[in-house]
Image: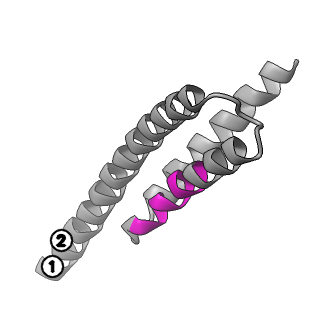
Amino acid sequence: MEAFYGLFIILGLLAIQLFLSSRNNKYLGAILPVLLVVFLIWSYMTDRIDSLLKVFLFLLVGMVAFLLEWGRGREYAKNKQKKELEKMKMYDTK
C-alpha cells in the first residue's frame, strides 16, 4: 500500500513539474530539481539514506525525469506561444 502512495506522489510531482515548466518563465521548472537535491542532501546528512550510492542513483533518476518533463513543458509553452502569434497575425491581416 505504501508503494501505491509513493507512485501517486511521484506522478503528482511530475505533473507539477510539467505545469511549472510550461509557464512563460522557464526558470520555474528549476524549483523541483533544486528541492530534490536539497532533500537528498538532507536525507543523507540525517541518515535517512544510508548509502551515498543510493543518493546518486535517486538524484540521477530524479533529474532525468524532471529534465524530461521540463523539456516537454518548454515545448508546450513554445507551441502555445506560436499559435497565439499566428492568431494575432491572422487578425492583423483582416
What residue did someone put label 2 on?
90
Mark 1–mark 2 distance (CA, rounded to whole Å):
7 Å
| Residue 64 percent location from the top left of the image | 41, 35
Judge depth for marks 1 and 2 and give the one in front. 2
Task: For residue 16, say whether it is visible.
Answer: no
Stretch in magenta: 27-36
User: Does the magenta portion include 58?
Assistant: no
Quadrant of the drawing holding the C terminus: bottom left
User: Does the magenta portion include 29?
Assistant: yes
SS label for mark 1: loop
| Residue 18 percent location from the top left of the image | 50, 49
Judged left or right of residue 81, residue 42 is right
Which residue ends up furthest to the left in the rendered image? Answer: 93
Tell me the kind of residue under disc 1: Lys
Residue 92 location, quadrant:
bottom left
Q: How is the image coloured?
A: one colour
SS label for mark 2: helix
Image disc number at residue 94 = 1
| Residue 15 percent location from the top left of the image | 59, 44
**Residue depicted at 57% across the width and 41% down the height:** 14
| Residue 27 percent location from the top left of the image | 41, 67
Q: Nearer the viewer, residue 92 or 24?
A: 24
